[in-house]
Image: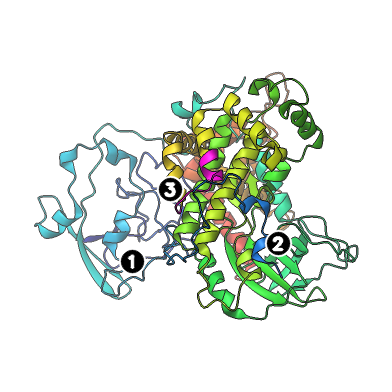
Amino acid sequence: PRKYRLGMLDERIVPVGSKARKAKNPIGCLADRCKTGVPINMVWWNRVTENNLQTPNPSANEFIPKGGSNSRLNNVSQSSMSAFSQALFSHPSMGSPATAGLAPGMSLSAGSSPLHSPKITPHTSPAPRRRSHTPNPANYMVPTSASASVANAVSQPPSTGQVIQKETVGGTTYFYTDTTPAPLTGMVFPNYHIYHPAAPHVAYMQPKANAPSFFMADELRQELINRHLITMAQIDQADIPAVPAEVDSYHSLFPLEPLPPPNRIQKTSNFGYITSCYKAVNSKDDLPYCLRRIHGFRLVNTKCMVLVDMWKKIQHSNIVTLREVFTTKAFGEHSLVFAYDFHAGGETMMSRHFNDPSADAYFTKRKWGQLDGPLPRQHAGLLPESLIWAYIVQLSSALRTIHTAGLACRVMDPTKILVTGKTRLRVNCVGVFDVLTFDNSQNNPLALMAQFQQADLISLGKVVLALACNSLSGIQRENLQKAMELVTINYSSDLKNLILYLLTDQNRLRSVNDIMPMIGARFYTQLDAAQMRNDVIEEDLAKEVQNGRLFRLLAKLGTINERPEFQKDPTWSETGDRYLLKLFRDHLFHQVTEAGTPWIDLSHIISCLNKLDAGVPEKISLISRDEKSVLVVTYSDLKRCFENTFQELIAAANGQL
């Protein structure tokens, strides 16, 4: 009897001695396996049999990962700080806050992966690769007793019917036992790609539309399109000559905010320097970044780069990551540039909630006693409390990570908090104050971090109070009493107590962890909302996951059909296998009803393309345009013609014919 081994690339039984080679079929798939067991993988088919065997392992996995992906992640005084860092309420027994420095900690979210030990079994060995495969849907239906752990399979002799397999990878020979359970008898899976309806937990999550949707929601699509548009935006260099073509390793600069006039003298209220912001592309990795330029700043001491390196290690979902800091003269003067991750479509909290002067004036009259007392919040235009708590959870989470790393935010201000989407917050411009206000006379650059961290909590309290009043007027000292009355009337006692705690000086050093009991179970509400949002986005992704594969099929079909000439043969596209593909194209797009009107059915087009991609044995009738010929073929025949013809075109394009 002839011996066989298990080919790991697509898990088929192949004869020993046959040469395994990667297939040339460029059709990538993500779908259910065929009824006959033919796997439909994202990797290339591995046709390794010498007799074109059609009997693969029925328990083969659908997806073989191609290894781990490499992440691309590779003159202001302290008294002139923003008003958001000054306490509003003073404790009667409170002296000056302690200024002892905190020891720098490690960021909870900035850990790096350890290097793999060379003594560990390489990831290309059969066993680890088999464990990393996407599980076969049939395996979920197998009784528990039918499956055994890999460790048991290795340590115990193989049972009856199990065969020790051998494979050589990278010059190393591996022996292993195939413990993949066989599917139960009677289980039938579709033999071509199909579209399933929405999952029940998503279908009942939001109001149903009048008709079922086969594509992602228009709101999500428009948001993504806007982000792509902003990411790809460019300027005409002739119209804006003040923007240089290149700054260090960045090019294609695009202003993200109005450029300050050349003769501007006044400085920004936040940093004490004139600043500007640009989107730029890094020539090293071709990724977009946000450049924050500090005009006219000359860096005289590089000791502050110790703090910059600490900021670069912080990775958090609510913090805009700092990538690098450098000096440049590309703008015609000494400038300091901070490079951050670019989040397209983001707007500041100031522009989202506090940029309506008329509304602010209206609420100011209502709230500060010029007219009647405050109305209920559903009539006064105040923000819903759930939104305010969502912001509190995100901002406190960002502060917790920053303080744990031994740093201080120092930019907890509505003008420096980005809002993307509906409620996603990110703290921007971190690390700028640490460089601009760096004191060379300090032996320990972290000595004042404890004081700055206390100021962060006060700034957080001011942001929350401004959101609760829906006006920046509420954080002015003369309006504090009325502002707190407004919060007391319209919001819960937990929100009022949180604001009072953050804005009142205590006789001890406070921590952001102190407000966690005030947030309480609302944290679970935000976690639930985030997971529900993830479910909706995954469902929208499932609607679009097959589009790339179908587009590749149509693109290849278009390169074959109606080609005027090939290899000096003008009838090439009308003869042989190409004629079948031409009739199949008519079967796809050019059918008519009994009355002679065009028959347009998107489901028919998608279904036929999926069957062609899978090569199912189903038969179809292809009728010539003169209706004198009828050809009965299977989709497997059409797929063979399709692949052979396209490979012929590829060979000619590569000069092999």
Tell me the element at label 1: loop
Looking at the image, tell me whether mark 1 or mark 2 is earlier in sequence order: 1
Q: Is residue 342 left or right of residue 543?
A: right
What is the C-alpha distance between the residues marked 3 and 1? 44 Å
Tag 1 residue: 124
Residue 426, image x, y percentages? 59, 50
Residue 383, image x, y percentages? 64, 31
Span of residues in magenta: 499-509
Q: Is residue 609 above or below residue 196?
A: below
Residue 230, image x, y percentages? 73, 52
Tell me the element at label 3: helix
What is the C-alpha distance between the residues marked 1 and 2? 52 Å
Q: Quadrant of residue 199?
A: top left
Tag 2 residue: 271
Which residue is found at the position 34% from the left and 33% from the top?
Answer: 188
Which residue is found at the position 70% from the left and 72% from the top?
Answer: 336
Number of other residues with Cα within 10 Å of mark 3, as a class: few under 14, some 14 to 19, many 20 or more: few
Q: What's the amino acid at mark 1?
A: Thr
